Amino acid sequence: GYSNMRRSVLGLEGAAEWPAVRALLPDLSGKRVVDLGCGFGWFSRYAVERGAAGVFALDISEKMIARAKADNGHAAITYQISDLEHLQLPKAVFDFAYSSLALHYIENFAQVIATIHRSLVPGSQFVFTIEHPIYMAPTRPTWTTDAEGRRIWPLAGYSLEGSRTTDWLARGVVKQHRKLGTTLNTLIGAGFAIRHVEEWAPNAEELAANPDWAEELDRPMFLLISAER
Amino acid sequence: GYSNMRRSVLGLEGAAEWPAVRALLPDLSGKRVVDLGCGFGWFSRYAVERGAAGVFALDISEKMIARAKADNGHAAITYQISDLEHLQLPKAVFDFAYSSLALHYIENFAQVIATIHRSLVPGSQFVFTIEHPIYMAPTRPTWTTDAEGRRIWPLAGYSLEGSRTTDWLARGVVKQHRKLGTTLNTLIGAGFAIRHVEEWAPNAEELAANPDWAEELDRPMFLLISAER
């Protein structure tokens, strides 16, 4: 289950895409941060260790919030059980918004993005990651081979947006597939300026240390976006 | 060959993505337009018919420029043979830049984008289309089927940017594959603000009129981008 994943046990350093995410972060010192889908609280703790003035950390899972408080609790972090699908935030109170692999579960994406935009003060950054739509689109998202035996990703239904049900970790997990363009246009429509779009893949050094990551070059699994209010 | 394609014979109306492109265009009346990779000049002519003050229309092909002058000539259009790979443009003289299915042949993309940016006056739009990187990435870009007989697009090498050689129309045509993120980050780096990103697919009405376009829902062929200087 989720608790046994590298990223759950090792924290941020256990996530392959973390160095690329970190490169997108602003200076967190003095920042009032909102962490949307905080999980076990690894990023919230990182933010206060980097000098964040405070972190408002939300997750729908009662168990995760309990463990976040136990393992990554800090006086400057407020952990709260909250369903992002019905996100409500105070207006213009945060200097940085962050979300790791949570927003691809959201059905009402446009409303959540608008809420995040309103919660930030002008000039603030919003950095988030979701599963890449190339990874989410197929109904059968597993590697296959072509007639010559080469590894291919069986892309289909890319433009058919909506629910995708997979059996990852738990049976019947429902994700919301959206085209990359839709994600960007929603941000732009809410008033965000797109600053960086990263379709994560390992670099040469990371590949040398983790040869099995080579398949990530064939199709991206993670999408990292930096936007500015 | 290219001359026999629907879009070459019928002009803009023969291109499936044209209605979506048209929806991204600003009011062209009075605009000084640059058309990069103008082909037979269909868009240049459209622009003057919509009131453009002038069009500077470039294409590398001597034959295409000759036919553009013959079929779509107009006093307000200046057709010129020019290799976009070494694009040179005067500074801050255009109000709108347009390019249809040309920039995915360009190797030195960042330099060309910077040149386009400098050629526009502040507040100008830049609308262009390229082949979608999902379409360009595979070394063998043809539909195949999975074990259950369902149509799949054999995605591979998405993050391996660089040349792709295909035998489309002519043998050994070399295209330059770039990740969608790279295209957007290059625009942002040059100073453009991303306004809209469209991964073209037919709408319900277009599908009803052209049932064979259904495969376009499985993987996008065209990428349409609107940006603002």
Image (spheres, coloured by chain):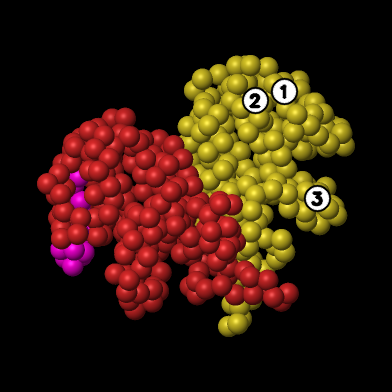
Chain colours: A yellow, B red
Decide if residue A173 is in sight here. yes
Q: Secondary structure at mark 3?
A: strand
Residue picked out by circle 2: A115
Q: Secondary structure at mark 2?
A: helix
Residue picked out by circle 1: A88
- The residue positioned farthest toward the bottom in the image shown: A148
Decide if residue B178 is in sight here. no
Q: Chain of mark 3?
A: A
Q: Secondary structure at mark 1?
A: loop
| Region in magenta | B55-68
Q: In the rendering, at what x and y percent does residue A45 appear? A: 70, 31
In-image side of B18 versus B91 (left or right): right
Discs 3 and 2 share one subunit? yes
In the rendered structure, find residue A173 and report the number of the disc placed on it: 3
Amino acid type shown at disc 1: Gln
In-image side of B26 versus A143 (left or right): left
Query: Residue B61 sits in which quadrant?
Result: bottom left
The crowding category of the residue bearing disc 1, from other C-alpha atoms within 10 Å (few below 14, some 14 to 19, many at least 20), is some
The crowding category of the residue bearing disc 2, from other C-alpha atoms within 10 Å (few below 14, some 14 to 19, many at least 20), is some
In-image side of A77 versus B55 (left or right): right
Residue at 43% from the left image edge and 48% from the top image edge: B19
Foreground residue, A179 or B44? B44
Circles 2 and 1 in contact, beta carbons < 8 Å: yes
